[in-house]
Image (cartoon, grey):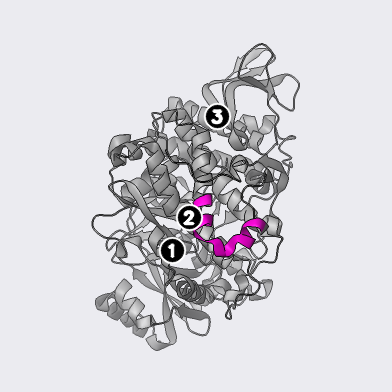
Amino acid sequence: MRTTVKNEAVQWTNAHWQLVNRKLVKKAIAEFAHELLIQPKGVESIINQYKIQADAPNTHYLFNARCLALEHWLIDENSIIKIVDNERQPLDLLAFITDFQQQLQLSDELLPTYLEEVSSTLYSCAYKYQKAQLPIEVLAKADFQTIEHAMIEGHPCFIANSGRIGFSSTDFQQYAPEADQPFKIIWLAGHKDKTCFTAINGLSYRQLLEQELGAEVIAAFEKTLYDHQVNPRDYYFIPVHPWQWDNKLTHVFAADIAQRELIYLGESQDEYSAQQSIRTLYNASRPKNFYTKGALSIVNMGFMRGLSPYYMQSTPPITDWINKLLEKDAYLDVCGFQMLGEVATMGYINRYCDRLGAKSAYNKMLSALWRESPMSKTRPEQQVMTMAALLHVDTDGNALLPELIKASGLTTYEWLQQYFKAYFSPLLHCFFKYEFVFMPHGENVMLILENHIPTGMFMKDITEEVLVYNKDIDLPEHVDRLLVDTSDELQILSLFTDVFDCFFRFMSAILEEHTAFSEMIFWRLVADCIIEYQEQHPAYKDKYKRFDFFVPQFKRCCLNRLQLNNHKQMLDLADPVNSLQLVGNLENPIAAYKFQTVLTP
């Protein structure tokens, strides 16, 4: 029997609703101002008070704030006031979006669907705030999955970052990561005429099934196929998210089911837990087994979360290529850098929609991949933690990062040095030595800690989101889809945007606000990490001039503008770099340290 939850609407108090609206209005002001969509103006005679004028002349907002490096607005959320016709009004994020619709360049056509995703984000946030939370000092010492499911923020830049358009209230309680309800997945049999299995070297289809299912379940599934009067050798077994089966596959693939090209086999014995990335499932019954990632045709943060069968054929070859390239790199080993390989895939072709091409959502409804689990690669004394946790602030306003540092016994200065060595140094090395970049945002990185001190990291999503800039590198068949032809400026912008603007900006602000650790010292340590790397690797000195991390400014990449422009497909995944929204420049917070040596405390 499939695990179900009671079909009730999620309940929260009006106080929680008001609280999350205030917090998300604060975020909307900060991020829309950061992207130059709205223009805060200082209020005369009142230090650190700002005003933003809505589209209508009778409506404005007031708030107290400081503007930190990278034009990061550190706003006192309790100071935010909305004024309409000289009267104070309650804060309402949906109303805020409509108040600034013209300035946000949000068309009437896209407004309702964007508001739906904003409303869904509010729903998710209110759920998280009414849910019991572990105290920060306990969470800092918690296990991998406890921390994973305690995350509140989602992507730090996006306003509409937790919308799950397509989920019902019951679905939310069953499948949302914050609900933390383990569930069983569905297994189908796909005929080999339409199903493609691909795996890394040394991993056979039978080995995969024996690990993920076991002999008893395999035998039961094969009996089901015999009962359907078909030969099991003509089919591949495909894991499927139960929501996808109930809401998409049973209807869209009805012809395939009727013709026995797709056959329902049953549920897994193991239970799985939805991760922050929602369609990636952790094996809660056997944590060392692979993650299972499948298509989930809901709209979530700028994309329909499908999974392309066309890309599935290239995923394991990319894993093989990257592993071979990096596995003997001594510097990455010293940094503790490891990857979670995407080791096997299944892709099922919808023959009716195949002619529409790889971009069609209907061609991304039935695929799966298996990814290595960090639990199979860690030692007992090591703690694994999503890097998103470094930006976690709980419902009482307490930040996790200072508590982690406190538990380590190190000073903030010392802890950050260890963190930059574990996280930023490997990214620098891959960029300068191999000329490629990952997508190293918080949810894509898992920190390895010992005694709460960062000693390494796991990088995931290494096949979908790696970009290779080196035209001279030998790329095998399938791997060549990673090659991107763009300017030197846009190559290094990948790191300026993903690391500086989308992570360090928030991390330094948390330390500034919660510990009074100066943002100047934070950015000096970032500069020191780069300087130290360059001093240790003089062989790439020509690249240090070509790709200068100490330029006075770099282009401002605006993520919310992408989502406001098209909330279902923010980027052309076949050409992500040239899909970016670049508006103006940001002052580089490490530019002043260009000709300096590493600072010692």
> For the residues carrying marks 3 and 2, which lies nearer the camera in this image?
2
Find residue 410 and report its image quarter.
top left
Location of residue 539 with respect to 63 vertically, above or below: below
Decide: few, some or many residues near mark 2? Use Cα within 10 Å; few <14, some 14-19, many ≥20: many
Mark sitting earlier along the chain (1/3): 3
Classified by dominant secondary structure, the portion drawn in magenta counts as helix
- Give SS at disc 1: helix
* Amino acid at dot 1: Tyr
Give the total number of marks visible in the rendering.
3
In this figure, which residue is indicated by the disc labeled 1? 331
Q: Tell me the quarter of the image containing the C terminus.
A: top left
Q: Which residue is mark 2?
A: 425
Q: Is residue 23 left or right of residue 201?
A: right
How crowded pointer 3 is (Cα within 10 Å; few <14, some 14-19, many 20+) is rated as some
Compared with 25, 570 (above or below) is below
Tell me the residue at 35%/77% (across/down). 208
Does the stretch in magenta take in 540?
yes
User: How far separated are the C-alphas under marks 2 and 1?
Assistant: 9 Å
| Disc 3 from disc 2: Cα separation | 28 Å
- What residue span does the magenta drawing correspond to? 531-545
Helix, strand or loop status at disc 3: strand
Q: Between 537 and 171, which is closer to the camera in this rendering? A: 537
Earlier residue among tags 2 and 1? 1
Mark pair 1, 3: CA separation:
37 Å
For badge 3, the amino acid type reads Leu
Around disc 1, counting alpha carbons within 10 Å, would you say few (fewer than 14), some (14 to 19), or many (20 or more)? Answer: few
Q: Is 425 one of the magenta-colored residues? A: no
Give coordinates of residue 113: x percent, y percent.
64, 45
Q: Earlier in the sequence, mark 3 or mark 2?
A: 3
Q: Secondary structure at mark 2?
A: helix
